[in-house]
């Protein structure tokens, strides 16, 4: 019995660490209580939302390619999971970057719906 | 006794050796610093600012030169300790502004101004340079901590 518990705990820990972009899409859709829209995500990504920058200002309008920080010019690895397997696999990083970047581009936090839409769109990019 | 006598000599040798290394700003290895501070910009050497400046910087990350660079508290404390431990002392020159607040920009320190006194405002604005924050534009080996005059190449 104890062994089963240990195995179960290990499996749970492993699954909690290695998340996939789809897991985040599901999480934000659940939080929003609505399915994501690819079109809305594409529009949101490319358009300025009140701030000086849009998402595309740094990540480009085709985030399968590398981006450039709009201010410092530092290279940014591609955001689309198809081009960069590391993206959307770590909850702490996903939460950190949505928190900071939404604040920079929208001057507020992003809604769960907005996050779901963007991820849904990013997942369509090949 | 012999060992004691050697001490002042060693100190003198160390002092003489200093000018040769004055432009060496290699960034000490630190995983948290690397991950958190270099995603958006180059690794600015901790030696280039006073400890007070780093403390002030790390206390205002949610408004970091116009961007939200906030990080979790554990890492914020760890990185602050790292920066303070390797911060520059008097070498950076005056690191306080007219209101006695710690300077946050390396480019506003006395040493930076002195070292760059020949660079005109127009040069800073060149497309390949953009701003005094872009060290690597002219100091090609800045990432390796080499800011020596001999390795400067100002792009047209």
Image (cartoon, rainbow, N blue to C red):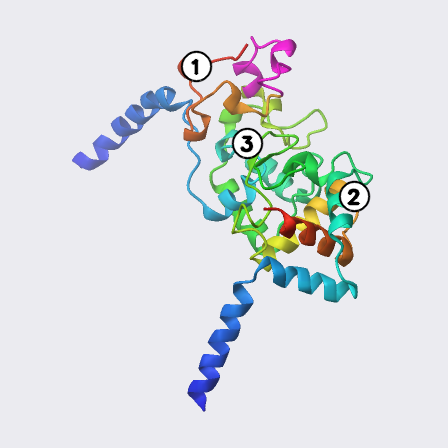
CA distance separating discs 1 and 3: 20 Å
Residue B114: image location, x then y, percent: 55, 14
Pointer 3 local density, CA inside 10 Å: few below 14, some 14–19, many at least 20: many
Residue B76 visible from this viewpoint: yes
Which quadrant would residue B9 be assigned to in this image? Answer: top left
Residues A84 and A7: in front is A84
Q: Chain of mark 1?
A: B
The residue that disc 1 covers is: B149
CA distance separating discs 3 and 2: 32 Å
Residue under the point 60% across and 57% down: A21
The residue that disc 3 covers is: B49
Image disc number at residue B89: none
Q: Earlier in the sequence, mark 1 or mark 3?
A: 3
* Above or below for B90 versus B71: above
Callout 3 and callout 2 share a chain = no
Residue under the point 65% across and 30% down: A71
CA distance separating discs 2 and 1: 42 Å
The residue that disc 2 covers is: A106
């Amino acid at each position: 019995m104890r062994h089963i518990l240990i195995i179960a705990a290990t499996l749970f820990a492993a699954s909690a660490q290695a998340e996939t972009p789809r897991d985040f899409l599901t999480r934000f859709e659940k939080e929003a209580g609505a399915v994501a829209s690819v079109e809305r995500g594409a529009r949101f990504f490319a358009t300025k939302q009140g701030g000086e920058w849009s998402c595309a200002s740094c990540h480009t309008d085709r985030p399968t390619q590398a981006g450039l920080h709009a201010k410092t010019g530092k290279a940014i690895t591609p955001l689309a999971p198809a081009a960069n397997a590391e993206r959307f696999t770590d909850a702490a990083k996903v939460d950190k970057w949505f928190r900071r970047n939404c604040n920079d581009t929208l001057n507020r936090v992003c809604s769960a719906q907005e996050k779901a839409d963007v991820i849904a769109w990013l997942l369509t990019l090949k | 006794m012999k060992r004691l006598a050697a001490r002042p000599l060693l100190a003198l040798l160390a002092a003489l050796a200093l000018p040769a290394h004055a432009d060496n700003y290699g960034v000490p290895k630190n995983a948290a610093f690397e991950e958190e501070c270099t995603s958006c910009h180059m690794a600015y050497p901790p030696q280039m600012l006073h400890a007070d400046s780093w403390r002030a910087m790390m206390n205002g990350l949610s408004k970091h030169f116009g961007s939200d660079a906030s990080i979790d508290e554990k890492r914020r404390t760890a990185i602050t300790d790292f920066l303070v431990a390797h911060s520059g002392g008097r070498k950076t020159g005056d690191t306080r502004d007219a209101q006695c607040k710690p300077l946050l920009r390396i480019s506003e320190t006395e040493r930076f101004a002195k070292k760059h006194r020949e660079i005109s405002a127009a040069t800073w604005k060149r497309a390949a340079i953009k701003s005094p924050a872009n060290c690597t534009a002219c100091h090609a080996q800045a990432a390796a901590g080499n800011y020596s005059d001999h390795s400067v190449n100002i792009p047209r």
